[in-house]
Every structure is written in C-alpha cells, then in structure tokens.
Image: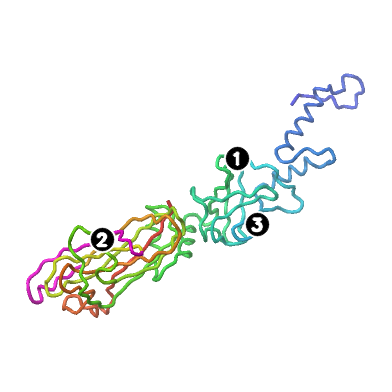
C-alpha cells in the first residue's frame, strides 16, 4: 500500500489530489481484505464490515445438523464462509452423538469427512456435552478433530462411558491401556466359575485343535467397532487332569470355528490325590479381524487322555473353594490403530 500522507486535506490543487496509482493502492488493499472471505459484489456497501464480523467470530459455530452429519452455522448477522483454508480451525458442540462415520459441513460449503488420529470417526466419539476442535486438512480434504474440553482424563471417561462390558472394568485398567496403546474403542469381559467335567479329549499332536474337540468353558460375542482395529484377547483358564491319565491341559481359543491361539499347561504327578494334576494358564492373542461383523470368541478345554475338570471335584480345585470366587475369564480389548 502506498503512503499518501496528508493529501486528502481539502486542497483542490494537484498537491492535494491522489494519483491513480495511489487511489488504486487503497482499493486493492480493501479488496485483498474481502476476497479471502467473500466474492466482491459491487451492489454491496458493507462487505468490509461483514468480513470483520466473520474474522471476529471465526471460531463461533452452532451445530444444526443431524446424526453423523454435523452442519455448522453462525448467527444471522454473520456472513457465510466461502472458502475452506488449510489449517482453518473451528470449535463447536455437537447437536447429536454419532453412530458411525461422520461428515462436517460449514454453512453452504461441501461436507467433509471427520477423522480422529488418522481414522474415520467410530460410533460414540461425538457427544452433546463436550466442545470439539476441528482443523481442516487440505492435503487429505478432511477435518481432523479432537476433544477440546476434558483433556486426557475426559477422553478416558468418554471411553469408560462407551465401554461395552459384561462385568465392571476399572478406570485404572483403562488408564493403563491408554498409556501403552492407541485409543481403546471398547472392552468386553466374560467369566465362568461353574464346575465342568468332560471326557472329550484334545490330542497332543501336530494338528490344529478343532472346535469339536474338548469342552467349551468360556464364550463371548463381540462386534468390532472398526475394521482396522486390533483385538487383544486375554484368557485366564483353570483346569485339572483327573486320575493322572494325561499330562497336557490344553485351552484352544476360537473365533467362531477358527482356532486363533492355544493356552497350555504341562502336568506330571503320581497316583491318588497327588495324581490329580491341576493348574491355570494365562495367554493373550493379538488379532485383526478385518471387518465389523459379530464373532463368537470361545475357549475350549481338554486333556490328551482321561478326564478334564474345570474347577472340579478334587480336593485341590473345587469350585466351591474361596466362596466360588475363582473363575476362568476371557476379555477382549479393541484398540484403534
């Protein structure tokens, strides 16, 4: 912009007149303020004030959209934004909780997908009580979002509220998981303290265990929230081999009918009460299912010969011991990649 000094001073001589270059400099400056926000319109006389209004309220938006379709607007006195700019930042409180992948539309602009941590939103991420900050990513043509209020503690509470569990999961467990992994999408747990006796054996050989072998001691239906997430399936199982006929306690883990892991306990012993070999085993299987359809995760148990007992009838492993509080458990943690 050119320096015009004090030329506009009611002096009607050439000394008080603006040259074309000086006048055009002033107009160009004004145009450059308006054009990033509005198209120049010769019929308007308040475009500069409208642009100032836009800039001063740049972060103030109200969601008037529907589920999975955020649509942001501002007060009626504020002009619309006509261009998405890389790094453009907005703050809003959702009008609806989302149930899956979600888009964000600013006024009349084209809706763009919302991502969190590089992944499209999953159900339950947006809620109507928190403020969220969204930043437009031009390279990927999307909005990247995060929780503005609540911080990391708020994120953990949101995860806890959304957890789908059969039994209680402590906040401490969630905290521990979040410290060492990605975002926890959901956790499910099932347990069994019932005494079970079975003569269905699982052979000790090079074959993969079958879903028809042994006896089922645990079962948990689970539906992933994301096709790209990782499942951590953790199993803690009890058992004993009655009468010392076999020395191998085996606990195969199945996703529907597919064996995806095996827990094992080797046993030795003599005769009589000392021959009722008992033990427990703990193992974890890391699994990417690759879709969002429900599967049944089950644990079967057996010995290679003789009788298998789950918290059975021997003096060492009766399920009534300790108030029947001992139990085999299966838990599934779904973690965002």
User: Where does label 2 land, which residue?
Assistant: 262
User: Where does label 1 land, which residue?
Assistant: 86
Q: Is residue 95 above or below residue 190?
A: above
Which residue is nearer to you in this view: 56 or 66? Answer: 66
Q: Which residues are magenta?
A: 256-279
Tell me the quadrant of the picture where the N terminus can be found. top right
The residues bearing labels 3 and 1 have C-alpha atoms spaced at a distance of 21 Å
Give the left or right position of residue 304, taking residue 147 as reference: left
Disc 1 crowd, CA 10 A, few/some/many (<14, 14-19, 20+): some
The residues bearing labels 3 and 2 have C-alpha atoms spaced at a distance of 50 Å
Image coords of residue 321 (percent x, y):
23, 78
Give the left or right position of residue 73, taking residue 250 as reference: right
Of badges 3 and 2, nearer the viewer stands: 2
Of badges 1 and 2, nearer the viewer stands: 2
Image coords of residue 330 (percent x, y):
33, 66
Task: Confirm whether the magenta stretch covers residue 278.
Answer: yes
Q: Quadrant of residue 50?
A: top right
Which residue appears farthest toward the left when viewing the image?
A: 271
Which dot marks residue 63? Answer: 3
Disc 2 crowd, CA 10 A, few/some/many (<14, 14-19, 20+): some
Tell me the SS state at disc 3. strand
Q: Quadrant of residue 156?
A: bottom left
Image coords of residue 168 (percent x, y):
39, 70
Tell me the SS state at disc 1. loop
Which residue is nearer to you in this view: 245 or 73? Answer: 245
Which residue is nearer to you in this view: 69 or 132? Answer: 69
Disc 3 crowd, CA 10 A, few/some/many (<14, 14-19, 20+): many
**Mark 1 or mark 3, which is nearer the start of the sequence?**
3
Tell me the SS state at disc 2. strand
**Marks 3,1: beta carbons within 8 A:** no
Task: Confirm whether the magenta stretch covers residue 29.
Answer: no
């Amino acid at each position: 912009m050119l320096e015009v000094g004090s030329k506009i001073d009611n002096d009607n001589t050439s000394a008080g007149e603006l040259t074309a270059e000086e006048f055009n400099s002033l107009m160009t400056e004004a145009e450059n303020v308006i054009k990033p926000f509005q198209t120049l319109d010769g019929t308007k006389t308040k475009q500069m004030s409208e642009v100032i209004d836009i800039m001063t309220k740049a972060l103030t938006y109200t969601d008037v959209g529907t589920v999975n379709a955020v649509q942001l607007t501002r007060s009626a006195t504020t002009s619309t934004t006509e261009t998405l700019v890389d790094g453009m930042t907005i703050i809003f409180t959702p009008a609806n909780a989302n149930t899956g992948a979600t888009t964000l539309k600013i006024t009349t602009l084209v809706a763009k997908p919302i991502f969190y941590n590089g992944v499209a939103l999953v159900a339950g991420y947006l809620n109507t009580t928190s403020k969220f900050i969204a930043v437009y990513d031009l390279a990927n043509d999307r909005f990247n979002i995060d929780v503005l209020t609540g911080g990391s503690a708020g994120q953990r509470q949101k995860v806890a509220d959304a957890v789908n569990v059969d039994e209680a999961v402590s906040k401490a467990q969630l905290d521990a998981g979040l410290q060492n992994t990605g975002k926890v999408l959901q956790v499910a747990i099932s347990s069994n303290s019932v005494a079970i006796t079975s003569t269905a054996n699982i052979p000790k050989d090079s074959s993969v265990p079958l879903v028809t072998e042994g006896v089922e001691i645990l079962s948990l239906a689970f539906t992933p929230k994301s096709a790209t997430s990782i499942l951590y399936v953790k199993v803690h199982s009890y058992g004993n081999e009655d009468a010392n006929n076999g020395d191998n306690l085996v606990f195969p883990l199945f996703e529907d009918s597919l064996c995806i892991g095996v827990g094992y306990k080797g046993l030795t012993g003599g005769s009589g009460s000392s021959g009722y070999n008992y033990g427990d085993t703990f193992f974890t299987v890391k699994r990417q299912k690759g879709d969002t359809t429900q599967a049944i995760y089950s644990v079967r148990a057996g010995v290679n010969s003789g009788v298998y007992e789950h918290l059975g009838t021997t003096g060492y492993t009766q399920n009534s011991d300790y108030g029947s509080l001992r139990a085999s458990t299966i838990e599934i943690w779904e973690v965002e990649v």
